[in-house]
Image (tube, rainbow, N blue to C red):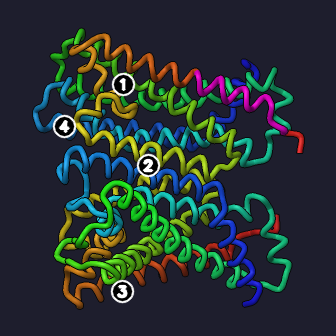
Amino acid sequence: MRKAGILIGFEIKRMLFSKTTAIYTGIYFINFMISAIFFRIMGSEGTVLTIGNAQSFPIQHLQASFLFTGIFVAIYAGQIITQDRSQGTIKLILTRSISRLEYFMSKVVCIFLFTVFITLLMIVLSYVVGMLFFGWGDVMIFFSVKSEGLQGILITMLSGLAFAFSYFAFGMIAATVSMLTSKVSVNAAIMGILLMAGQYFEVLPSVKQFAVFHQMLFFHINIFEKSFVYNTVSFLVLMAYSVVFGMLGYRIFRKKDLYV
Amino acid sequence: MEKQLHHDFQKLIYQKRYLMILVGILLFSTIYTVYLAQKGLSSIEMLHIGLSQLRPIYWFICCYMICDVISSDYHHKTLKTTVPYSKSRTAYIASKCVLSAAICFLALLVHMISSSITAYIFSPHMEWIVFGEFFALASAGALSSIFFFVSLFIFCMIVTENEAATIGFSLGTVIIMLILESIEQLSKYVPTMQMITLQTTIHANLTIGMIIIGTLVLLAIVFTLFTMSIFRRKDLFV
């Protein structure tokens, strides 16, 4: 497992300092700036914000970043799954004393860490933009939740963790798809189109709770708004997606001919 | 440039996924137009609604096709072998620009032609002047936006030399524009909307329409020239 730890450490360093992360930061920043400017001009009619203050800014933006975050997670999953295969470096790694399972699990852990990292990045950036445009404010409002100060930050972090978990389940689907492709762009395009089409599950009330796309949009809200039983079912749905696609991805990877 | 273009074009022909994308668009357009025809809409309304519905996914597909064309040599590490066969590095970039713009425009043509034919079958009383105007202005709006995006994405690819960064940047840019579209006052200036809004803009004010198209094309030329100058000075011998 120590070798898997080294692989994870390497991926974390790259995650933090890569050009891709810089581009994602820029895109999120522009998105939050647009939202803040429009709220200033048009009020809550023109944006996803219901109140203009830094306390509420991050948590109110999580849902609106559905497409951005989904695509960035898909790109990351595709990148870490395909890079070693496309560059031929996987042969070097697997000739060391590391099993395919350990190698695959290190990638799964990296995808989870990336979803947490990108959520934190979003939250920090939106606090910054919120402070620049509106100041800290008196109260944090998010649907029926009203809070302030440190408690508000903790609620935002809890919501962010739920958000990251639902995107991790989506990341596992992206990882499985990328096992079948060799290019990041193919994976990103497929997952991007799936994200757009997946939103149509919202018109099917009886099944939407079982769609990962619905959970990506609402799980971080429902933990405050819905019953414990409803949230337990949602959590199990996300776990099921993660486990099933994780196992499927590993099965494809185990049977992959890497000796060419 | 012709040699490079021929080589890139052959690569597209052999890679069946582009054919699959075009067939997918053809099927979607035909089926969706038939669905709209059942609602009793006029042919021009069918074309308008069909194009509006396809547009967000069309731009996602364009992002993929542009990034795939411009990043293939970086991905397969064949840049060192391909560039010497090209007349110059400028010709290499120009060829990639032309090819990626052409494949995106071809995808739009497939949609417009298939939905027009289907609309004509279900509603033969088509006003040809209105149809011609719609076709020409939607194509002009789409082409100017395509050139703008191609130049922007190829600039990102040459600067970052990273496929994942480029696809992230391209999809992120398109999503930001899709967000900007929701603001009514801004929507007629957003590049992703030009294939829909150019007709209305030109009818309301010809000068503004021409300025929008002119600005997009000018930006595309400036970005492409800038990219070419960076690419010419790049150390590709490592």
Q: Position of residue B63 (x, y in %)?
A: 51, 41
Q: CA distance from mark 4 to mark 3?
A: 40 Å
Quadrant of the rendered image containing residue A75: bottom right
- Foreground: disc 2 or disc 1: 2
**Which residue is label 1 attached to?**
B113
Indicate the chain on which mark 1 is placed. B
Indicate the chain on which mark 2 is placed. A
**Which residue is label 4 attached to?**
B36
Q: Secondary structure at mark 1?
A: helix
Quarter of the rendering occupied by the C terminus of chain B:
top right
Q: Position of residue A183 (x, y in %)?
A: 64, 54
Q: Is residue B129 visible?
A: yes
Amino acid type, mark 4: Leu
Residue at the (61%, 42%) spot, across then down: B68
Mark 1 Cα shell of 10 Å, populated few (<14), some (14-19), many (≥20): some
- Foreground: disc 4 or disc 2: 2
Mark 2 Cα shell of 10 Å, populated few (<14), some (14-19), many (≥20): some
Indicate the chain on which mark 3 is placed. A
**Which residue is label 2 attached to?**
A30
Quadrant of the rendered image containing residue B139: top left
Q: Are marks 4 and 2 on the same chain?
A: no
Q: Secondary structure at mark 4?
A: helix
Q: Is residue A217 visible?
A: no
Residue at the (62%, 73%) spot, across then down: A252
Quarter of the rendering occupied by the N terminus of chain B:
top right
What range is drawn magenta here? B222-235
Q: Position of residue B179 (x, y in %)?
A: 33, 46
**Which residue is label 3 attached to?**
A236
